[in-house]
Amino acid sequence: MESFLLQASIYLAAAVLVVPLSIRLGLGSVLGYLTAGILMGPVMGLAGAGTADLQHFAEFGVVLMLFLIGLELEPAQLWDMRKRLFGMGGLQISLTIAAIAGALWFAGEQWQVALVLGMIAAMSSTAIVLQTLAEKNLMGTGGGRAVFSVLLAQDLAVVPILSVMPLLVLPEVSGLTAETFGVTNPETVVAHDAGMAEPLVHFVQTLPAWAMTTLTLSVVVAIVLVGHYVSRPIFRFVHAARLPEMSTFVSLLLVLGIAFLMMLVGLSPALGTFVAGVVLANSEFRHQLEADLQPFKGLLMGLFFMTVGMGVNFALMLREPLTIAAWTFGLIAIKAAILFVIALVFRLRPRGRMLFTLGLAQGGEFGFLVVSVARTEGALPIVAGQMAQLVISLSMLLTPLLFLIFDRVALRLAARTTERPADEIDEKGTVIIAGIGRFGQVVNRMVRHSGVPTVVLDADPGMIETMRRFGVKGYYGDPSRPELLEAAGLGAAQVLVVAVDDPAKAVQIVRFARSKRHDLHIVARARDRVHVYELYQAGANDIVRETFDSSLRAGRYVLENMGYSDYEAAALSKAYFRTDRAAMRDLAELWVPGQPVDQNAAYVERAKQLDRDLETALIEEIYDLRPMEPEKEA
């Protein structure tokens, strides 16, 4: 027990000391965990004897991560990924295997070993790449989605890759024994790994091919059915107990159970939990699952990265530094070249192309699994296996640096990128909507479906293309450009909706439109109170604060739960709206641009008076709703 506590304290201390420093230096948390592992293992020799077992345990963090990613994807979104999943992913895997295996075979390596090493090299690091994409907010970009699709395809490919290992056993040659491959007694290894589950594992392994296929399909179908139908009543039953820890228990049980079933039938546990996450993406318990599992995912992922750092074989690297360096940088260069070509074929934008190229150029944790199985089956000599593990580890260590290179390249690309010419607008609308983000989309749908023609403008070409795929016509261009507004029909439009994200551009658009059309009705979206004043002075007629209406709705719900009827709460909400709207106009007249409102004496005094007026208005509304009954004489 003392040894365990000491080892745990060392791990935690290393993470606490190194990771925040790495983040402060702009290197990211992943490189910090890897560095902490290197310091604990190869440098200071503080790693315990069970590092390999610890790494297998920490790999469960990858399983949790893919489950949580699945929760963010609805089945329809996954279906939309099919071209990237099988097109980009299939090309990356097949071309990488062909290139690496071909190069090694021409260099004189046996074709079986060359093919195994090619399959190992085709894998990329799901853990490091997805963690880094999340930290840099790149998951939602075109390049980020392409990277995720390829990683998911690699996860799917692990099963067939492992299944062909028995077919690649090297021919018997003089002096070749099981020890040459690092396996002294494979049966003992399997039994040790199985542990308590050995009888069940043995039973499954002895099934005939048709029964194994049936069992595998049954497990996959069961996961989908349990996620869709059974999980909801289970969660409701557990939540009825009103014990927060029970929710965590059932969340872990769900993921652990699915992972075990997938491993039992020889499939990737990460793939199984990902599918379960997608099935549960529409569940009302989705956010509870995320809250329960997120801390475990973060802890295990950090532990996994540390064990990768501890596993770096510096002794082998010092014996053959040039060979190891050549293999490592050669792997990154070959994979990057293949990825760049694929990105060109699929027409990724320059920034997404660089993210795709550099983000997947390393080896991955599934490569360790392929090395282990290949050595167990006798398809890979121990020296080649050790070399492959070291190259994978070093390439993973270099991944954060590859992302730093991407950051630099992305900045240069942004500076050099020439602006796409604005679309030619071939129609006019009675309503012009400038900006088609979350706010503008709702306005556009409501107005258009009510039979009023609209013209949509947005400066994001990706957003315009997305809207067009959904049948919504829009035009690319910066709405703050006067010629674009005039081309959209500003001279004849009845209403202009300003819904752009940039507050300064919103004011600019309103000011220009008002200068051209004094009779135009302008509806503008405001970020905050100061932005309201700016838009008011620029000439907007109706100004909608981003969170104002939702805040009023929330206040109404509070009143309804404090004894007010639905009608009374709605009436008070309307009274607040009327009073606040008038107050905003009064304060806008007193607001001085560039002067903080708390230093404007007239503004502060008027704001205090308006707050008292608001209280009076609400009290009067309550008296109107609930007139006081006359007191009865005793």
Image: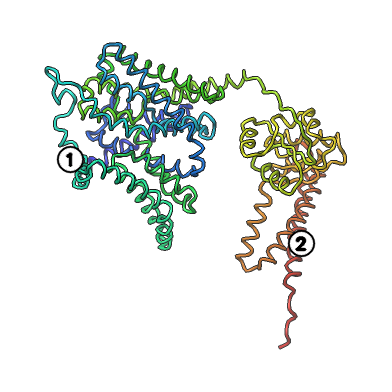
User: In the rendered image, which quarter contains the C terminus?
Assistant: bottom right
Seen from this angle, which residue lies furthest right? Answer: 518
Picture residue at 23% right of the left edge, 44% below the top: 204
Residue indicated by mark 1: 191
Q: Which residue is mark 2?
A: 617
Who is closer to the viewer here, 339 or 396?
A: 339
- For this orientation, the residue located farthest to the front is 210
Quarter of the figure with residue 65: top left
Q: Residues within 10 Å of mark 1 (few under 14, many from 20)?
A: some
Q: In the depicted view, which residue is nearer to us: 14 or 261?
A: 261
Q: How far from the left and from the top, in percent, is residue 350?
A: 56, 22
Instruction: From this view, report whether residue 241 is shown above or below residue 351.
Output: below
Q: Name the image quarter holding the N terminus.
A: top left
**Relative horizontal placement of residue 466, taking residue 528 as reference (left or right):** left
- The reply to whether residue 122 is in sight is yes
Camera-nearest residue between 177 and 16: 177
Cα separation between marks 1 and 2: 78 Å
